[in-house]
Image (tube, rainbow, N blue to C red):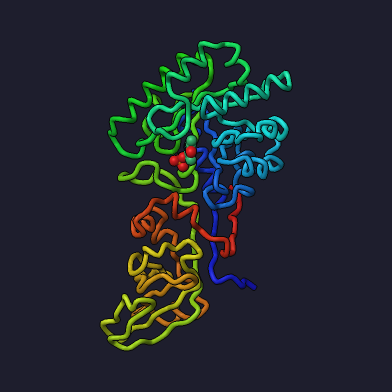
Amino acid sequence: MDRAGARLLIDVGAVIANWRLVADKVGPKAQAAAVVKADAYGLGADVLAPALAEAGCKRFFVATLDEAMALRPLLAEAEIFVLSGPLPGTEGDYPFHGLIPVLNSTEQIGRWVAQAERVGRSAPAAIHVDTGMSRLGLTLAEARALAEEPSRLAATGAVLVMTHLACADEAGHPLTPLQRDRFALARRYLAGLPGSLSASSGIFLGPDYHADWVRPGVALYGGNPTPGQPNPMGQVIRLQGKILQVRDVDAGDTVGYGATHRCQEASRIAVVAAGYADGLFRSLGNRGAGTIGSWRAPLVGRISMDLVTFDVTGIPESAAHPGATVELIGPGQDIEALAREAGTISYEILTALGARYLRLYGARP
Ligand SMILES: *Cc1c(COP(=O)(O)O)cnc(C)c1O
């Protein structure tokens, strides 16, 4: 018996196919890592990271030390990089657990090198250079200063130099080639280190942006890395809610909090078991639609915490009845379409998916 009001179907094979598409696109000169931070964008790093490792992925990126420690026992061989870098006092946890920090500041480098001196051995790390995000990373001047101290650079155990593009998803943005050129300069300073420049969108800017390692995240999970153009990635999730009740309402009746939807005529309203606590953005109120079989049912009224309402007038009762399924994410409305309706990006749709769904993982290819 399936007790859940709503289910999230996650196609593991589609994630692997998306990773292979990226790996083939950048190969053989560059290799594809996988970004599985935030629980693989909400879809389950415990399932997806081992599946990607089995498919040949050798490098993973997460945001925090806790995420990395949870992943470590599930990935026998693969390297795990931690994007936030070591917080003060956690430096020893990285070599202890076999994890690789991304060093984002001279301050982090200072603590990292001090530890290497303490234990008499350097451990692997990545060096992040900021080329235009003004978020994490060394300035170009700091990268140059580090390069001018070869013994300090050696003590960092650097195995990778990386940067992150700010505007790769905006075609023709002038900051993107500027960041590429600044990164080339940083790599000249830190000569000999393998480089990593691009996340999902940068990968689709061509070989100039591939360096040695690419770091796809959202593209693996079906997000469109080329906004405004057809999505080259396969869709990964379907989200289906069950109808709890179908009610007949009179012309002039209103639906939900705030009475924001008024029925123009006698209507049938299906009440479905998913709400903003499950990641259906409240901004979707009176926007978007669900699909029931081949029918489209407009979403009406505000989204409640646990419930959402659809106008199913005209859809036969044999299709729209208690226990039947309304698809909220699927071929009829993918994560990009839903994100547009909600006024956000597919990243936020994915990472907001709640914990209440029955999660079903599709078979591997
Ligand atoms: C999140 C993140 C990525 C992955 O980004 P996508 O746009 O999801 O591919 C890559 N690199 C860094 C530094 C990140 O923070």
Image quadrant in which you'd find residue 262: bottom left
Task: Measuring from the top left, give residue 123's x and y in whole percent.
Answer: 67, 24
Quadrant of the image occupied by residue 89:
top right
Q: Position of residue 310 (x, y in %)?
A: 39, 74
Return the residue nearer the eye: 95 or 338.
95
| Visible residue check, residue 125 | yes
> With respect to residue 336, does 276 lie above or below?
below
| Above or below, comparing residue 143 to residue 317 in the picture | above
Quadrant (top left, top right, bottom left, bottom right) of the N terminus: bottom right
Q: Position of residue 264 (x, y in %)?
A: 26, 82
Along the horizontal axis of the image, is 73 left or right of 216? right
Residue located 58% across and 36% down the image: 82
Q: Is residue 280 left or right of residue 361?
A: left
Q: How many marks?
A: 0
Residue 28 at least partly seen? no
Relative image position of residue 237 (x, y in whole percent): 50, 55
Q: Nearer the viewer, residue 156 or 238?
A: 156
Residue at the extreme left:
264
Residue at 55% in and 37% down = 84
- Residue found at x 47% / y 33%: 136
The residue lying toward the viewer, choosing from 278 and 31, is 278
